[in-house]
Image (spheres, rainbow, N blue to C red):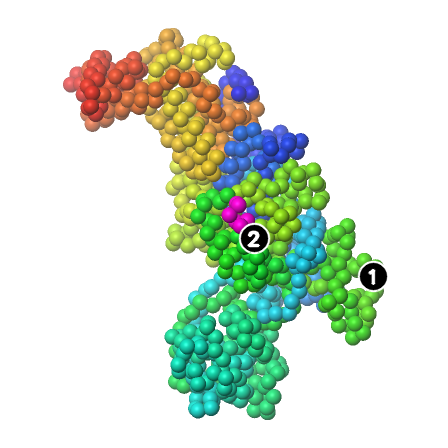
Amino acid sequence: MTEQPRSPSVPQKPSLDGLEDKWVRVWDDEGTYRFDRTKPRAQVYSIDTPPPTVSGSLHVGHVFSYTQTDTVARFQRMRGRTVFYPMGWDDNGLPTERRAQNYFGVRCDPSLPYDPAFEPPERPDPKRQIPVSRRNFVELCHRLTDIDEKAFEEVWRRVGLSVDWGLLYTTIGDESRAASQRAFLRNLARGEAYVSEAPTLWDVTFRTAVAQAELEDRDHPGAYHRIAFQGPAGPVHIETTRPELIPACVALVAHPDDERYRELFGQTVRTPLFGVEVPVVAHRLAEPDKGSGIAMICTFGDLTDVIWWRELDLPTRAVMDTAGRVTASPPPGLDSAAAREAFAELAGRTAHSARERIVELLRESGDLDGEPSPTVRPVKFYERGTKPLEIITTRQWYIRNGGRDAALRDRLLARGRELAWYPDHMRARYENWVEGLAGDWLISRQRFFGIPIPVWYRLDADCEPLYDQPIVPDEAMLPVDPSTDAPPGWAEDQRGKPGGFAGDPDVMDTWATSSLTPQIAGGWERDPDLFARVFPFDLRPQAHDIIRTWLFSTVVRAHQEHGRLPWARTAMSGWILDPDRKKMSKSKGNVVTPMGLLREYGTDGFRYWAAGGRLGTDTAFDTGQIKVGRRLAIKILNAAKFVLGLGEPAVGASQAMDVITAPVDLAMLATLAEVVDDATAAFEAYDHTRALERTERFFWDLCDDYLELVKARAYGAEDGPDAAAGGDADSARAALRLALSVVLRLFAPFLPFVTEEVWSWWREGSVHTAPWPARDELPEGGDPEVLGAAAQVLQQVRRAKSEAKVSMRAEVERAVVRGEAAAKAALAADDLRAAGRIAELSLDGAEGRELTVGVALAGR
């Protein structure tokens, strides 16, 4: 060890109160966790830290998972690595926009001019939002994220995360914007990014496209409607939950093996109300046992409609607009006067209102067979949305991800097998996601507070964009905003003019930037020296539910840009569950914020609970475990005060190991050596929970058994601390101090504040930069069974006193120990006599017998 002991300075009344404020300030002032960029790559451990979404407040689930990562960072630092441990804020995207709208009472209207003097109302009304320009809105988003980020940093510092705050980045900052746009432009140059007019999942509330990875199924109430189409030989009944899409119907479909409809294949039927002739087609995805077995193909009702439309080469007849309302004009094909008259009854209505009206019309026309049958079915929602998604044909940007390229999909599956997963079974989620991709990654969003698509378009004589003639910036220009910056070689006064240019109005999906966190944090192209020292990263920690989004997208970008994985291993944290065993999330309103708990119970107690959760395992929030952690921290304070209060061994530090000769002292340290080995192996296997469990169990045994056994000897005589030192006192004192040093370092990744406090009482430097303990620090030759046997004897003596309802200080006239372990206990006979106040101790080492202790109390 390089840290030198010094004369202890132990507080009279040690306390956990105020430790966080004290040590956070010291760590910051002394740069305890500062990354040393002079070290070669082999001595660096780099962590791709998740940048939390800055929208509102952190909750206990964040503290849970980030604490687990912090234990790894602290362990690696104590193992001699310089740890690249940055923090980022994910501050662009829909969550920030939504929060800014409600917080300031505004909404973005890109058609409005910028008002440099605009200030939001003092008392905003979220229901009567004031329209502002895009630039004004973005400025308000920045203002709000600045407030939130300060609050986030306060929580993380209180939690004791050992990040280097000098490495802080934001996903909307200039460096992130430049990296995100650079990666996109290179994707575009290699043909990996492309623009396409295609059916798109669309959230009508946010009015933006949504990617496959952002979907979730929710049970949604509806009703089946049995509706008659007019066939060549009579009515053909379909059953649908979306009768408002009848004007969007382009075909009926049944399974090719369905005998009921085989005669209809190749013929046409007429839609009710609108009288449009549509073909009857066959496709394997039709379900004979669902409803009537024949279904409408509408453009578009669901994702299966998209498959049918594409594979059967059907026309498009769209009727829903981006606001979730029926379009004002009928689509192509509804050409008759009757069709247009029927469509006028629906135009401008929401999907729900249009559904109600068309059911009335169908009932009047006699085409509704019976009444609607209520049902509850899974419906696609945007994960942050409140209304079912529509599918609308729009022009969007995509990045190839293997969804339409089997060869690329296989290469990305192979990348997943190269990656070390903790726990290993999480790899299956990655593979299931990649194998189930239905299309490429849609990255464009019709929003405002995000990283702009760095593309402009030439305008023709009618000011229509020539999408096949994009204009892109040089990388040296990045970051750019096409809505305010002119493209290279053009002047701003040419914007929006015939023969001039227009900027792409969209921004990138937030995952398109978050997928580059290793590159952003590591200084890709900005700081090549740093990037070479940290990339590929050693660890990506994250929650298991975003394998499909964050992890997969990061693998995609690194594969495309660097031809390799972005990190060597990934660690998956579980969810935090509320008392009803439901995932805690801000959207569900069941979260618990951490700051009050951190102040009430102390950070170390909170971290103890978090570290008790295993990777990949969902854990219930439990203040009971936080209280247990607080009691453990208090016990460390008190045990350390006792050990250091015994006085130093009579020999110097360099000779301390030489004076540890008592068998029970050597036994305790031999047991500790096994704990060191187990904890080290556990951390190396990314099993922080196992490391904590082994350390904690040893510590309580140390306090409950070993300390009680050797207390009198450590004081110097049986009569207590005022007596002169006895012969083996130095052995006990040296063993206790050595054990304290090792235990503090074993606990340091989990309980950073109390361990740093105790370390400071008698050691120079920080416990968090001290070497991780190793077996060779401890003396050899000890037999752990000696301590185990002696502890059993003492426990049975105590039990006898407890059952007799006498004080633990009561004298024992005679204790007879029998059993095979008695010979081991005999090596601690003097300590047993003193600890148990035993006048006569008899040990009978009979082979094959369990250890028993007969106790005769004095005066009984």
- Of mark 1 and mark 2, the one earlier in the sequence is 2
Direction from residue 15 to residue 534 in the image, left or right: right
Q: Residue at x 50, y 84 (%)?
A: 266
Residue 845 visible? The answer is yes
Point out the stretch of residues depicted in magenta: 414-419
For residue 490, the mark is 1
For residue 191, the mark is none
The x, y position of residue 701, in whole percent, is 35, 27
Instruction: Give SS at disc 1.
Output: loop
Q: Is residue 595 above or below residue 240?
A: above
Q: Nearer the viewer, mark 1 or mark 2?
A: 2
Q: Residue at x 57, y 62 (%)?
A: 404
Neighbours of disc 1 within 10 Å: few (<14), some (14-19), many (20+): few
* Quadrant location of the C terminus in the rendered image: top left
Total numbered badges shown on the rendered structure: 2
Neighbours of disc 2 within 10 Å: few (<14), some (14-19), many (20+): some
Mark 1 to mark 2: distance in Å? Answer: 41 Å
Query: What's under tag 2, amino acid-wise?
Result: Arg
User: Is 11 colored magenta in this rendering?
Assistant: no
The x, y position of residue 692, in whole percent, is 43, 34
Residue 319 visible? The answer is no
Q: Is residue 621 above or below residue 678?
A: below
The foreground one among 567 and 329 is: 567
The x, y position of residue 519, in whole percent, is 64, 46
Q: Residue at x 47, y 91 (%)?
A: 232
Query: What's under tag 1, amino acid-wise?
Result: Trp
For residue 411, the mark is 2
